[in-house]
Amino acid sequence: MRNWSFFIGRFAGVDFRLHMTFLFLLLFILLGEVGRGGPATILRSSILTLLAVVSLVLHELGHAWVAARQGFPVKAVILLPVGGVAIGDPSVQVDSARSLRRETLIALAGPLVNAIFAAVAGGILLSRGPASMLLSPPLISVNNLGVSFFWINTFLFGLNLLPAFPLDGGRILRAWLAQRMEFRQATRRAVNLGHIFAGLLMLSGVWVQWLMLVGVFIFMAAQMEERTVMFQSVVEAVHMEDIMLTEFSILSPADTLEDALNKAVHSLQDDFPVVSGGDLVGVITRQMIVERLRREGNGYVQGAMSKAFEIASRTESLGSAFRKLTSRGLSLIPVVDQERLVGIVTLQHLMHSMGLLAESRRLRRQMEENI
Ligand SMILES: [Zn+2]
């Protein structure tokens, strides 16, 4: 999903990426102006798109500010023309969405920002001209950017309060549902309702064209969010004992680096636990071995291994272990049962083991069905 977006800037510590669908929005505005053409129209269409982007960035900063105050800092956001999808550590997002009060506060902050900007823009416009100017269609047009800014913000305010996941109203709905059922199921329900809203909007596109576009954007955003939650729940449902390697090579601190490299060649293993007298004393990677050999010549594993490592228990979830791995930049996590090393999970093998696990579960299910 990152491939469909590009980085546009970092504001208040949040990385903003713009989704490609904004190009559709620009194209849509331009097409509406066909015939009235000329470079000035292209410039004004671009400014109008830019106003939409600015309104959305402010909206997202509203969410991010409240989220950070609640202890859930947002790292990055992908902007779609209807709102943003927060990206980064999905588990953090899930944690914050589990509390109804917290999710409601975070969700309302975005539309509130748009309400404030609409009120300010409306106030300024009304002080300069008659109210009819604000109300005469087309409400959003390249010819009146001030009025358009007012309506874009009014529209973002109203739209985001719809209970159509992943719009803000839909997030509150999901948090409410999550009090009553499993989080994954709550997301499914909210997504389904979001799809219904998206469908209705697409249908109403017969009368008001741009509503169809809004429907399409909601649909896309819902898909993106659902995938994140589904990935998260898979990662939480898999335990270390399901995927750990139980046949692996170990090194001893007294092994020489040359011996260690030799072992790496013969085992196709990139990461090794270092064990001394049955105790796990460190971890070492093939890269660490090679670098130390190159820099200082032959020595012992003892001097090159890393003693700062994390361990996981058999029943720990992959998600939890994964967070340990990534927070320390490690590539191997030893699995320990009653202080005994029983397996390892490495980034190198993770995808492979996950694939095999899925395959074996599928086969087991098939066999059960055939009995
Ligand atoms: Zn929002």
Image (tube, rainbow, N blue to C red):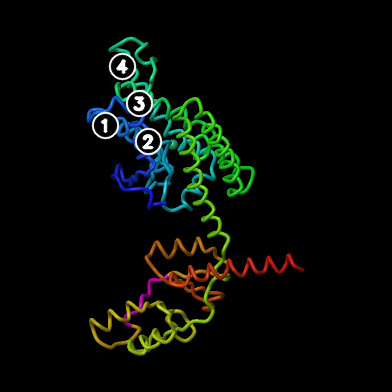
Percent x, y for residue 232? 52, 55
Q: Which residues are magenta?
A: 303-309
Instruction: Single out the residue that lies furthest toward the front.
Output: 35
**The residue under label 3 is which amino acid type?**
Phe
Q: Which residue is mark 2?
A: 25
Q: Secondary structure at mark 4?
A: helix
Given residues 73 and 144, the one toward you in this image is 144
- Viewer-closest of 154 and 286: 154
Mark 1: C-beta under 8 Å from nearest atom of ligand 1: no
Q: Amino acid at mark 2?
A: Leu
Residue at mark 4 to residue at mark 3: CA–CA distance: 12 Å
* Amino acid type at mark 1: Ile
Task: Name which of mark 1 and mark 4 comes first in the sequence.
Answer: 1
Mark 2, Cα crowd under 10 Å, few <14 / some 14-19 / many 20+, is some
- Ligand 1, seen in the image, is in the quarter at top left
| Number of the label disc, if any, that sits on residue 42 | 1
Mark 3, residue position? 117
Q: Nearer the viewer, residue 11 or 195?
A: 195
Q: Which residue is mark 4?
A: 125
Outermost residue, top direction?
Answer: 130
